Image: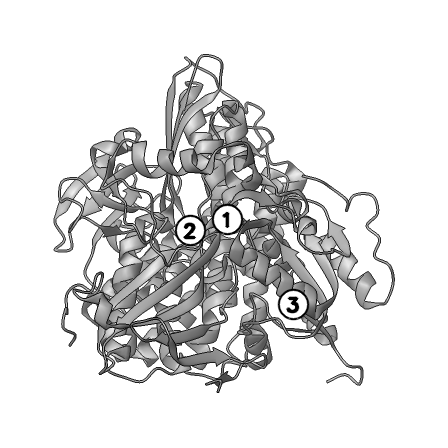
Amino acid sequence: MTNESNNLETATHPENLRRVAIDPVSRVEGHGKVTLLLDENDRIHQVRLHIVEFRGFEKFIQGRPYWEAPVMVQRLCGICPVSHHLAASKAMDMIVGATLTPTAEKVRRLMHYGQMLQSHALHFFHLCSPDLLFGFDSDVAKRNIVGVIGAYPDIAKQGVLLRKYGQEVIRVTSGKRVHGTGSIPGGVNKNVSIEERDYLLKDVDQIVAWSADAVGIARKLFEQNLDLYNEFGTFRAHTLNLVRADGGMDLYHGGLRARSMDGETLFDNFDYSRYWDVIFEDVKPWSYMKFPFLRSIGPEQGWYRVGPLTRVAQSDFIPSSLANQARKVFMAFNGGSAAKATLGTHWARMIEMLHSAEMIRELLHDPDLQGNDLVAKGERQERGVGVIEAPRGTLIHHYKVDESDQIVRCNLIVSTTHNNQAMNEAIRQVARQYLDGKKLTEGLLNHIEVAIRAFDPCLSCATHALGKMPLEVELLDADESRIDVLARSSEGSFCTPG
Amino acid sequence: MTEKKKLRIATTSLAGCFGCHMSFLDIDERILLLLELVEFDRSPITDIKHCGPCDIGIVEGGICNAENVHVLREFRKNCKTLIAIGACAINGGLPAQRNHLDLGSCLTEVYLTEPGLVHGHIPDDPELPLPLDKVHPLHEVVKIDYFIPGCPPSGDAIWKFLTDLIAGKTPELGHGLIKYD
């Protein structure tokens, strides 16, 4: 136990402690790092995940015509551009007063499920599988996708081909694999032709089968390491996700559901176009990323968790048969422990990947995809809010547009931002469980990264790491002089430079 | 193992969105062929922290803070051939949209004046690296040997470029592979 067992955010007397930095930790769009403050007995007093890059997107989009937003905004992120593309499009649907035609909604949904599939495949296979398959303390030289290709060629190849299929769905619906232009205010600019449909149908059964296999892999990993997976970085949290009117999972559209850590429903099917009635944001001086919280609970205790674990556990069911079966197994497993565990997120993510594959198959058989009624219009509004469940969690886009069609205000709360405090909790928990009072080793450091990676591939790969970030950890004493340093050498081995 | 010594490649993303690295992965199963010809030094797919001596360096994203400058110089020092990939690396791209704005007013807007904030203040902890006043393209800081345009360039373009380069030819992207969007 630490001196401040329940809150490692701010040490009482930082001046007497030494600083350890994990820098860089990769993260969303740029660099992040973790800092720890320790006393002379290696007891930990403070742990923080800092987000260290500032973009100013909300400011520089002002003055741009509103129809540019869906194309501009996706360039915030090359890993989940479709999520930004669609969240902005949904906000612009409100601006132009449109109710989507069936063809437009289904083409967008197809694009979104393609995005879910590729992003979840990338995260599980390319980013996290090296830790999960080889172990958190395994040889750093092998702990990457190249190592997985060598040791588990079939699994690696399935991962590559699952991602490829998702990317092809995105290309067909948006014109490009990364930063396409398919969705526009009030609809879409193309349908899915018979040829395109047949091209995607050709492989879809295989993709569903491989996704089901991936759920099996994730489940097996949990079963084989039950104690570790149950406790690793696990903490209690309130939750937030979109659900459709009947409480089922819907990744494209729905109302907001929040539940307390005790399972009490705080609000349900809340109209997201007034999200600020329930969510505010806190600012802390040590991170460019804000800290959202539920207004009814307040900034101190009101933080929450979004993403696959929340969506699978807090939706009442999943509206596709294989994924719903998989959900039942997940929820019942070991008395429900996986549904509460940070590392259970990987299993939940694979269930969502299976759901996305099933939804792609269902949509491809829908003749509405070949419809020609693509764009709707209505009464022009000045305010638009678009919310979608992105791969990493709930994503909020909010714009105000003036009479000359220029955007005058913009607020974005991206998925990773919702999870800001949750990620800090996870690494503090890991620090308490594995690092407190011990001498640092490379393997222990990787535990911190493993906890961060469970949340979000943007954090695992934005700036540095598709899978593994390079690290140097410095131990500095109170007057900032270096007393110890650990670094990965250019061969990937871990050493203490003289 | 092949007889021939593999070429070493390093890649990194600075002030970019990672979309160019996604496109790199869009070579799909050809990555298995690529791994027969090259080995990765510092890159998102390895654990290597600092770029060692390499044949090819590929850099995505522009320069938005001092740390980006250090990383770019390290790449230039170690890589025989340095490639700027994508719009941000070539001209600053989307992040450079902030260049006509005052950085202070940007920070004020996002952290102080937006509705729905509590404890509004501009993050100023010493742990945060200072952002540069402007976002710069790579060639303003170091010499760049090749530029691959696109936002992002396609996986096919990256594959063609790399296979030409690895084969010892001057890379050529013909019609359909050179795109600026």
User: Regarding mark 1 in the picture, which secondary structure is present there?
Assistant: helix
The part of the image, by quadrant, that contains residue A395 is: top left
Along the viewing direction, whichever of A149 and A495 lies nearer the viewer? A495
Q: Is residue A252 above or below residue A167?
A: above
Amino acid type at circle 2 is Pro
Task: Specify the label residue A391 is tagged with.
Answer: 2
Q: Amino acid at mark 1?
A: Gln
Q: Whole-percent x and y of residue A474?
A: 40, 75
Residue B81: where, in percent of width, then height?
A: 76, 64
Task: Identify residue for label 3.
Answer: B10
- Residue at 59% x, 46% y: name it: A178
Residue at 66% in and 42% down: B91
Asked if A309 appears above or below B111 in the picture, the reply is below
Indicate how the structure is coloured in the image: one colour
Dots 1, 3 in contact, CB < 8 A: no
Chain letter of disc 2? A
| Residue that mark 1 sits on | A115
Could you say which quadrant of the image residue A234 lies in? bottom left
- Check if mark 2 and mark 3 are on a common chain: no
Label 2, label 1: how far apart the Cα atoms are:
8 Å
Q: Which mark is residue A432?
A: none
